[in-house]
Amino acid sequence: LKRTAILNISYINTNFNHFLNIIQERTNDRSNTFIVTVNPEIAYYAHEHPEYQKIISGADFITPDGIGIIKASEMLNTPIQERITGFDIFKAMLDWGNQNHKSAYFVGAKPNVIEDLKAVLASDYPNLKISGMHDGYFDDEQSIADEIKQTQPDMVFAALGSPKQEAFIAKYRHLNNGLWIGLGGSFDVLSG
Ligand code: UDP
């Protein structure tokens, strides 16, 4: 898999379908996989916050999530093929998970969004197994981590916004061999 670095962040440089094949195979194999989707705001934040930079450096894949990243790569004469967004990955993995009877854990967003999301999942992805769901405004993150450890989902979708979601994933990914991805506002979008 080709990668291209811009300002100390190494982005995958491929097309969406190729990337999907890779992560579906890894999820099928229960490989521990951490995906970060980086837009220009997050790239800037990483530049200013070394501890966050370190967290995302530990990810398996960083995708270019924003036309600004693609433009920058072109200006630097190291063009990145395609923008790959968290929301597109989310939808594709829900589809795949539904078709293949995979399981998923959802953490993030406001309680009412989680309620709406539950309904969307039940109607549009009936064969996806829900390992658990929790809103993103919790005091006791340990109980969420415990639930993920107990249920061992194929996929963990964390929509807490950056940098919170990446810090959460980096801290707990060792508890479950599967796919872990930070999704920003994707729960709001899918449920809305
Ligand atoms: N969020 C959360 N817990 C928090 C802060 C934010 O679950 O402590 C959720 C928020 O409700 C929203 C998501 O994180 O669903 C992403 O927020 P935002 O739109 O700011 O992030 P972006 O999509 O820009 O990364």
Image (cartoon, rainbow, N blue to C red):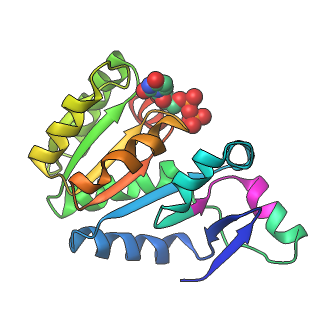
Residue at the extreme bottom: 1
Drawn side of residue 67 relative to residue 125, left or right: right
Q: Range of the magenta residues?
A: 63-71
Q: Tell me residue 75's x, y (percent).
A: 90, 68
> Residue at 25% of width from left, 38% of height from top?
121
Quadrant, the C terminus: top left
* Residue 176 lies in the magenta stretch: no
**45 lies above or below 26:** above
Residue 136 in view (yes/no): yes
* Res 143 → quadrant: top left
Q: Tell me residue 26's x, y (percent).
A: 30, 73
Q: Tell me residue 120's x, y (percent).
A: 28, 34
125 or 62, which lies in front? 62
**176 lies above or below 163:** below
> Residue at 30% of width from left, 47% of height from top?
172
* Res 142 → quadrant: top left
**126 lies above or below 58:** above
26 or 167, which lies in front? 167
> Residue at 37% of width from left, 22% of height from top?
113
Residue 185 in view (yes/no): no
Drawn side of residue 92 relative to residue 41, left or right: left
* Res 11 → quadrant: bottom right
55 or 183, which lies in front? 55
**136 lies above or below 129:** above
> Residue at 39% of width from left, 40% of height from top?
168
